[in-house]
Amino acid sequence: NTIEFSGALHATIVKQVLLNNPSNYTLAYNVILVGRDAHDFSLPKGNTVTIPAGGQGFVNVEFTIRFLHPAEAVLLLISNKVDGIDGATMVFSLKAEVRSIEPLGIIRCRSPCYEL
C-alpha cells in the first residue's frame, strides 16, 4: 500500500493509517520509518500503537515538504507479543511531492539595471 503526501512547498501534511484488529487478542506494534528520506517524516504520537481486541488503532504520519524533489520512505509496523500473540508485520510505502509553490513573502526593491 502507498500513502501519498502532496501539497504546497513548506506545508505540513498529516496522514492517519487506520489499523483494524479482528482477533480476540490485543495487538501491539512498534512503528519504524526507514528509507532515503525517512528523516523528513515523523510520528507525532510516538512509535508504538496498541490495538484492542476487536477494535481499531491509528498511526499518524507527518511530513513537512522542505524540498522540490519527491521524497520516499517506508513505514514498518512490527508486532510485539501481547497475550502471547504476534500480529502480522505491515509495510507501507510513503511518497511525497510538491504540488504548488506559494511565496513566503515578497520583497520589492528599485535598482538601476546598468551603470557605466
Image (cartoon, helix red, strand yellow):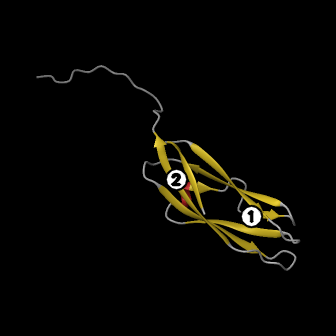
Q: Is residue 84 rendered to the left or right of residue 79?
A: right
- The residue located at (49%, 64%) in the rendering is 36
The amino acid type found where label 1 is placed reads Thr
Q: Is residue 30 rendered to the left or right of residue 25?
A: left
Callout in the foreground (1, 2): 2
Circle 2 residues within 10 Å: few <14, some 14–19, many ≥20: many
In the picture, residue 108 is in which quadrant?
top left
In the rendering, at what x and y percent does residue 76 appear? 64, 68
Q: Which mark is residue 48?
A: 1
Circle 1 residues within 10 Å: few <14, some 14–19, many ≥20: some
As displayed, is residue 3 above or below residue 76? above
Q: Which mark is residue 102?
A: none
- The residue located at (82%, 78%) in the rendering is 85
User: Pointer 2: what residue?
Assistant: 96
Q: Is residue 4 rendered to the left or right of residue 18?
A: left
* Camera-nearest residue between 82 and 40: 82
Mark 1 lies on a secondary structure that is strand
* Camera-nearest residue between 21 and 10: 21
As displayed, is residue 83 above or below residue 94? below
In the rendering, at what x and y percent does residue 64 appear? 56, 48
